[in-house]
């Protein structure tokens, strides 16, 4: 808990706080009443009971009295599509009139409508629109965000989107993980050439963009309206060749074998999972794959089949929760709202929701060694809340109780 060799030289100590450490070595949320957090050079040195804080640490450069407020790890949104052009409000109206997501997609709408708008948008336009969405997340205590591409579907626009994603971290104090999602949909210029497009993604886009340092992970959309498991396997094999981890949009609209495929490739996460079967979930658990739940898309699409939460619990699958912020199926920029939806629509407990937006979300991004819990050695990424109990972060609607966000100790 304490690194004594550094405790005498702390930059900042937050005192008189209640902690939800989310540390896996503690039960539940890892609650510490009358707690304190100490940081040095952006890293946590101490997180525990204030009475155990070394006396020398009270000579830190900065002492912050939290006045009994709660401190949690900064929240993590581990599945977003923040960078895109245009919007899909018209398609929302079509769905209200009875059209399905699949019907809209097959008629050239859906992802492809956003592809057209994103190709036409300038890099500056994409940055400005993405910053508005990112700022909404930051305002709720988010300290790390995954940003997927996938609305370009050609090398130039995918590069542009990933460059914008990287640039967001230069505009704001936040960690950004950039994920390449070239296997998102079939672009119109490859309408009758599926094999050629998969080869283009695997053989050209992945090695090129990886060599340019624009990718932290590779994703794919494995679904009957997108790509087959065999096609995604070719994409994942290309990611493996350049040393990149993979993630997967899996089993959202049908059981396409996505969960098993994610397990086969040791994916960081498999996301959605409404139609995943027990064999696939068991394989994910064995392979250490995180199940990322996306209640925003479930809600917007008026789905009726929720993810098999009891099977996930049975197999002790780590569950994360994310916004899936995107223009079509989850136009949401509130991770707190996603937590409420995960509880009310999927039946997660408060503890599961909060672990899902911190510790397990960090695992889903490959950041578990760096953030997601209040433990010595992790980044001092904190959220300080004006609440009386952690459940308030899940049960309230349209309420943001953030008092302060701390990133890298600042």
Image (cartoon, rainbow, N blue to C red):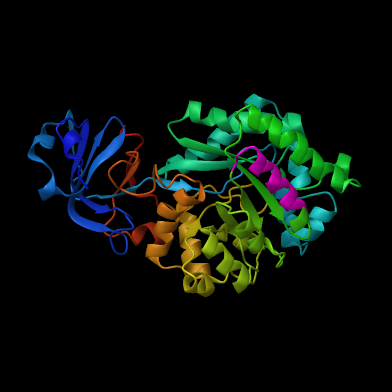
158 or 345, nearer to the observer: 158
Q: Main secondary structure of the magenta part?
A: helix
Q: Is residue 398 visible?
A: no
Magenta span covers which residues?
Answer: 231-244
In the rendered view, tell whether residue 243 sits above or below residue 160: below
| Residue 270 x/y as whole percent | 59, 57
Q: Quadrant of residue 353?
A: bottom left
Seen as rendered, the residue at the extreme right is 192
Q: Residue at x 30, y 48 (%)?
A: 374
Indicate left or right for 55 with 138 as reference: left
Residue 162 in percent (x, y) is at: 63, 33
Specify the farthest residue to the front: 241
Q: Position of residue 193 (x, y in %)?
A: 89, 45
Quadrant for residue 388, please give it. Answer: bottom left
Name the side, left or right, on which 79 lies relative to 75: right
The residue positioned 73% from the left and 31% from the top of the image is 157
Relative image position of residue 332 (x, y in whole percent): 56, 50
Which quadrant, please, contains the C terminus?
Answer: top left
Residue reaching furthest to the left = 55
Is 122 left or right of 306, judged from the image as shown? right
Which of the two residues, 204 or 362, is positioned nearer the viewer here? 204
Q: Could you tell me which residue is drawn at 65 percent across and 67 percent down? A: 303
Judge whether 62 appears above or below 67 on screen. Answer: above
Q: Is residue 237 magenta?
A: yes
Residue 75 seen in this snapshot? yes
Q: Is residue 137 above or below residue 19?
A: above
Q: Is residue 169 magenta?
A: no
Callout count: 0
């Amino acid at each position: 808990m304490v690194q004594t060799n550094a405790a005498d030289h702390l930059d900042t100590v937050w005192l008189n706080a209640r902690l939800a450490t989310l540390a896996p070595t503690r039960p539940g949320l890892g609650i510490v009443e009358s707690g304190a957090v100490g940081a040095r050079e952006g890293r946590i040195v101490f997180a525990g009971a204030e009475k155990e804080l070394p006396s020398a640490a009270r000579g830190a450069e900065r002492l912050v009295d939290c006045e009994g407020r709660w401190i949690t790890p900064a929240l993590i949104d581990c599945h977003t599509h923040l960078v895109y052009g245009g919007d899909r409000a018209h398609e929302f109206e079509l769905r209200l009139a009875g059209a399905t997501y699949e019907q809209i997609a097959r008629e050239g709408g859906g992802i492809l409508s956003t592809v057209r708008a994103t190709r036409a948008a300038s890099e500056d336009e994409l940055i400005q629109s993405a910053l508005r969405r990112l700022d909404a997340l930051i305002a709720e205590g988010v300290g790390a965000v995954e940003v997927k591409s996938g609305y370009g579907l050609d090398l130039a626009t995918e590069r542009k989107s990933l460059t914008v994603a990287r640039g967001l971290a230069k505009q704001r104090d936040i960690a950004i993980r950039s994920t390449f999602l070239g296997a998102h949909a079939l672009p119109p210029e490859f309408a009758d050439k599926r094999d050629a497009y998969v080869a283009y993604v695997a053989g050209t886009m992945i090695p090129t963009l990886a060599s340019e340092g624009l990718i932290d992970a590779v994703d794919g959309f494995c679904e009957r309206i997108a790509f087959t498991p065999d096609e995604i396997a070719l994409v994942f094999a290309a990611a493996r060749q350049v040393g990149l981890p993979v993630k997967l949009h899996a089993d959202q609209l049908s059981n396409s074998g996505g969960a098993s495929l994610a397990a086969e490739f040791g994916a960081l996460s498999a996301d959605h999972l409404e139609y995943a079967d027990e064999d696939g979930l068991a394989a994910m658990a064995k392979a250490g794959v995180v199940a990322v739940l996306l209640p925003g898309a479930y809600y917007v699409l008026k789905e009726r089949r929720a993810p098999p939460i009891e099977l996930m619990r049975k197999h002790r699958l780590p569950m994360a929760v994310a916004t899936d912020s995107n223009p079509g199926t989850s136009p949401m920029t509130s991770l707190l709202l996603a937590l409420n939806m995960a509880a009310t629509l999927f039946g997660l407990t408060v503890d599961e929701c909060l672990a899902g937006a911190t510790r397990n979300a960090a695992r889903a991004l490959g950041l578990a060694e760096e953030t997601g819990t209040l433990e010595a050695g992790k980044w001092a990424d904190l959220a300080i809340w004006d609440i009386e109990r952690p459940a308030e972060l899940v049960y309230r609607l349209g309420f943001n109780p953030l008092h302060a966000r701390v990133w890298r100790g600042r």
